[in-house]
Image (spheres, helix red, strand yellow):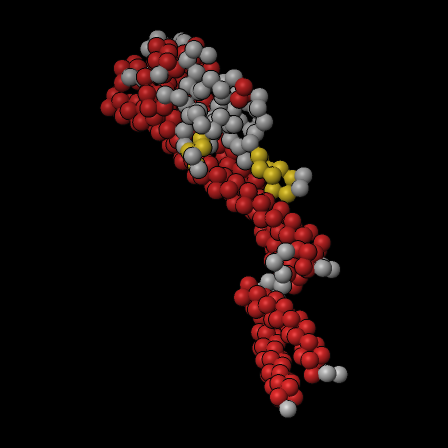
Amino acid sequence: MSIIGSIGNLAVDQAALRARLDTASRQVSTGQKAEVFGDLKPEARRAIDLRGEVGRREAYSNAADRALGRAGATQTVLSRLHDISATLGAQALRSKTLSSTDAENLASTAAAALEEVAALLNTRHGGEYLFGGSDVDQPPVPDAANIVTSPMATAIATAVATLDATNAATVLADSVTAATAAATTPFSAFLEGAGLTEATRAVQVADGERVEIGVFANRAQDGEVTASWGRELLRNLAVLAATTPAQAAEGGGWSALMDGVASAIAEASTALATEQAILGAAELRIGTTRDRHQDTLVAVRTQLGSVEEVDLAQASAELSQLKSRLEASYEATGMLSRLSLAQLLR
């Protein structure tokens, strides 16, 4: 073989070595075997499938995290509402022996609680109202700041003002009407319209698996509307806020009225506890499913890494070896070139 032919063969080998060197340099720099799926043959299809699985699991895991954040915020509100109902319910039970001063304090406390409950029902998380169903941009209680003087509270105050020794049941019935009638309901038009029949908000946590996390301000999980915990809290707090020391002092229908209020608030407390338990079970289910996704993600990412990622130690050693081989090849080319030149100069 001529010297020139040998130099040509070395040039071909050097081109191949440079290509391999470029690939090894990129792999060491990026930690990836290839820049595009096509260069991963024959494992390109497996890499695509694994990446799809990673994306799916991450989407479910992220959705579960958001749902748990929303559910946690909802639980905080429900807990406070339960505390309010327990406190005011107990005060209503004790109200039969109140002095005029205590009765005045009860009305004042109830008015403050009424304002707080209305504000709590308008709690937002992530910019969305928690208790408004799918109408996440509008408050469930449109005029919460003025709930004490709202049409509902005003109608209830009018009814309470008629209290006598015989009509406590009528007063309570009138308060129910005030809390449910379209003209005086404290809730939004959406909740009292389309929201009454819409499905509870749910989160997709896995293929074919949805978990309900929605809570409505004006209806319970079992679909109860008229005596739902939210409506009953607002209604009975408005009744207590409308009472006067004179009514407590006269007796009359006072005891019957307080018995009715205490009983209704106790039922609201029970419904709130049920709401918390249902939501707690949903949180547990979501958390368990999220953890399963995250555990699976670890395994899938490991598999994907074995397909797409290089062993950096091995790749670095190969890079060093290729550099040495290419340098030796260049030296050989230089030596042959000098020999060829010497032959020409003879």
> Residue sitting at 46 percent across and 12 percent down?
182
Q: Work out which quarter of the rendered image holds the N terminus and state it.
A: bottom right
> Horizontally, is 277 left or right of 265 in the view?
right
> Horizontally, is 146 left or right of 26 in the view?
left
Total residue callouts: 0
> Residue sitting at 52 percent across and 40 percent down?
67
Image quarter of residue 208: top right
Above or below, comparing residue 11 to residue 183 in the picture: below
Between 129 and 30, the one nearer to me in the picture: 30
Residue lying at the far right in this picture: please name it.
1
Between 41 and 200, the one nearer to me in the picture: 41
Image quarter of residue 77: top left
Q: Is residue 339 visible?
A: no
Image quarter of residue 303: bottom right
Residue lying at the far front in this picture: please name it.
346
Residue lying at the far left in this picture: please name it.
101
> Residue sitting at 69 percent across and 51 percent down?
49
**Residue 203, image x, y percentages:** 57, 37
> Residue sitting at 45 percent across and 32 percent down?
128
**Residue 185, image x, y percentages:** 43, 16
Q: Work out which quarter of the rendered image holds the C terminus and state it.
A: bottom right
> Horizontally, is 99 left or right of 160 in the view?
left
Above or below, comparing residue 149 to residue 201 in the picture: above
**Residue 343, image x, y percentages:** 65, 88
Between 197 and 137, the one nearer to me in the picture: 137
Residue lying at the far bottom in this picture: please name it.
346
**Residue 338, image x, y percentages:** 60, 86
Q: Is residue 127 visible?
A: yes
